[in-house]
């Protein structure tokens, strides 16, 4: 509940375990981002509880949130600095993370010379440095073009398969939701409630062409129906 | 000789082939450079012409001292070493007062802005008075400042601080408070304290704005010094004091030279800070013209 009395979320409850990729889809303004802010502890709830293992949290914002005055590698080192890691330790973690997202050649660049997709990769790398077992992504690829988005989706899945973190992913793109997740939650318009839940049966690794499968289209269709009746 | 050479390059280099033969590359860059220099040069010539016209045609010889012709000003103010030394020595005094005042204004102004950025109540209790300091006609305070601190160097510096401090406070505060909300969220998620937030996030974010403040205040500090030199006459004269002396003794060549030097000082100080700004923020500041 916001101070002005707006009720953003009502009776929302869900859990995520390691190895699970849960995506929340919903119409814009339904409180998806608020849900994530509450789950991460950025916003307090007026009622209700968040149970979270006291672990490092990887959080990826809608925009890349890079510090423009820092080079790519110094941006990736930031979280290490905030958590008082030693210089060598955070440099090593940053190099590893940059390699994972394929940007090791750009470590000396400033964000202004990177494309939107590259900035988002740096943002991902930064979140990876602390090796968080729990990841929260708030519409991270919403501002990217379709081709870059698909590419980053693939890369994200590879990271997920390698590191098996518990993931909460917010999006309004249902194809992205079905392609990435083990579970898709559909939220209704304000006040946000979870109105439908779908298990995604496809095994990882998933080929990008899975999107053109009949089973995939079928599931996407069901999510789409649920989304339409929710808004 | 040059003609065949040009033809050679235009056939060998595919990028030059689109350029018509007569319009080879060196000529265009020269043309562009000339086009840049030419208009202000013309303005300057017109200005000089007008000056001569007023000196020789508009003013009769008896009144020519009101505006001596340019070459007289150069002869008296720039060629006679005695006069030149007098002017440059005064200019040095003025520069010293401005820079001391500016540094004090920067230290106090940035400290206040940082304090204000830390809590809304501090901002509310200080900011109105910063505005008041800005709006006090500085000349109204001159007698009081003189009583308290003497009619000398110290009082000059105080005037400079009062004139130069406001742009530093406002620009620094604006820079510190205009940090993106999601960047603050990022720092909150990782339990960053006030100090970390200030040093790693707010101050670097404020740098471009801080430099804008420095630039504005640097210009103001020179103006402030000259004003103060008119009133606080003890100690080293400074260019402002000389202006007053030349006015009183009808030495208009020297008066105009002094005006020239004081303007030059303002411009140089402004350039200096622009250069500093550029050197610090150019590498990373996204001006919107680069690739995004």
Image (tube, coloured by chain):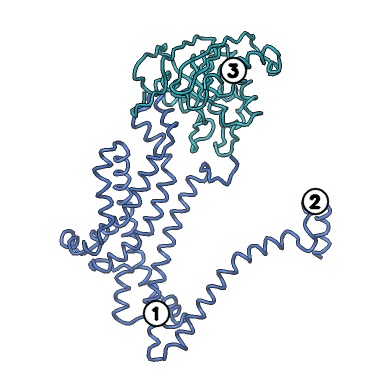
Chain colours: A cyan, B blue
Query: Contact, CB < 8 Å: mark 3 with mark 1?
Result: no
Label 2: chain letter: B
**Residue farthest to the left, as pictured:** B147
Disc 3 chain ID? A
Is residue B264 depicted above or below B211 in this figure? below
Name the residue carrying label 1. Answer: B253
Q: Which residue is mark 2?
A: B13
Tell me the residue that label 3 is attached to. A225
**Measured from the top left, where is residue A194 in percent x and y?**
48, 15
Residue at image location 42% in from the left, 39% down from the top = B204
Tag 3, which secondary structure?
helix
The answer to which of A141 and B139 lies nearer the viewer is A141
Task: Say whether mark 1 and mark 3 are on the same chain.
Answer: no
Closer to us: B27 or A208: A208
Q: What's the distance in space between the residues labelled 1 and 2, CA to CA?
A: 58 Å
Q: Residues within 10 Å of mark 3 (few under 14, many from 20)?
A: few
């Amino acid at each position: 509940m916001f101070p002005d009395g707006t009720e953003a979320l009502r009776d929302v409850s869900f859990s995520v375990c390691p190895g699970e990729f849960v995506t929340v889809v919903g119409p814009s303004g339904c409180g998806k981002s608020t849900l994530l802010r509450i789950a991460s502890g950025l916003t307090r709830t007026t009622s209700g509880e968040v149970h979270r293992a006291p672990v490092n949290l990887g959080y990826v914002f809608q925009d890349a949130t890079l510090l423009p005055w820092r080079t790519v590698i110094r941006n990736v080192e930031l979280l290490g600095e905030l958590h008082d890691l030693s210089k060598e330790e955070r440099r090593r973690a940053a190099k590893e993370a940059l390699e994972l997202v394929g940007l090791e050649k750009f470590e000396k660049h400033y964000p202004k010379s990177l494309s939107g997709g590259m900035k988002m990769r740096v943002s991902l790398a930064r979140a990876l440095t602390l090796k968080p077992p729990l990841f929260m992504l708030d519409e991270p690829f919403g501002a990217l073009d379709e081709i870059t988005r698909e590419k980053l989706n693939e890369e994200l899945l590879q990271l997920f398969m390698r590191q098996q973190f518990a993931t909460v992913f917010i999006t309004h793109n249902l194809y992205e939701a079905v392609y990435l997740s083990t579970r898709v939650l559909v939220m209704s318009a304000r006040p946000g409630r979870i109105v439908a839940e779908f298990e995604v049966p496809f095994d990882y690794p998933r080929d990008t062409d899975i999107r053109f499968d009949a089973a995939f289209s079928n599931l996407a269709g069901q999510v789409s129906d649920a989304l339409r009746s929710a808004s | 000789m040059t003609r065949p050479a040009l033809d050679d390059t235009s056939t060998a280099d595919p990028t030059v082939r689109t350029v018509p033969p007569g319009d080879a590359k060196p000529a265009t860059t020269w043309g562009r450079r000339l086009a840049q220099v030419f208009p202000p040069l013309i303005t300057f010539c017109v200005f000089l012409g007008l000056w001569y016209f007023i000196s020789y045609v508009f003013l009769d010889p008896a009144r020519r001292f009101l505006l001596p012709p340019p070459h007289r000003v150069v002869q008296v103010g720039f060629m006679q070493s005695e006069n030149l030394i007098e002017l440059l020595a005064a200019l040095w005094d003025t520069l010293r007062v401005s820079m001391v005042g500016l540094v004090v204004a920067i230290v106090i102004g940035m400290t206040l802005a940082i304090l204000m950025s830390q809590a809304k109540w501090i901002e509310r209790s200080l900011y109105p008075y910063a505005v008041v300091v800005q709006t006090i006609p500085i000349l109204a305070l001159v007698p009081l400042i003189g009583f308290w601190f003497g009619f000398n160097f110290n009082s000059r510096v105080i005037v400079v601080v009062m004139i130069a401090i406001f742009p530093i406070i406002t620009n620094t505060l604006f820079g510190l408070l205009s940090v993106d909300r999601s960047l603050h969220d990022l720092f909150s998620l990782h339990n960053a304290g006030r100090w970390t937030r200030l040093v790693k996030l707010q101050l670097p974010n404020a740098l471009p704005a801080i430099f804008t403040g420095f630039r504005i205040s640097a210009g103001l500090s020179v103006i402030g010094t000259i004003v103060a030199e008119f009133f606080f006459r003890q100690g080293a004269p400074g260019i402002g004091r000389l202006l007053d002396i030349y006015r009183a003794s009808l030495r208009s060549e020297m008066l105009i030279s002094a005006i020239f030097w004081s303007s030059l000082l303002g411009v140089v100080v402004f350039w200096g800070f622009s250069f500093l700004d550029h050197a610090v923020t150019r590498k990373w500041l996204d001006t919107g013209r680069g690739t995004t």
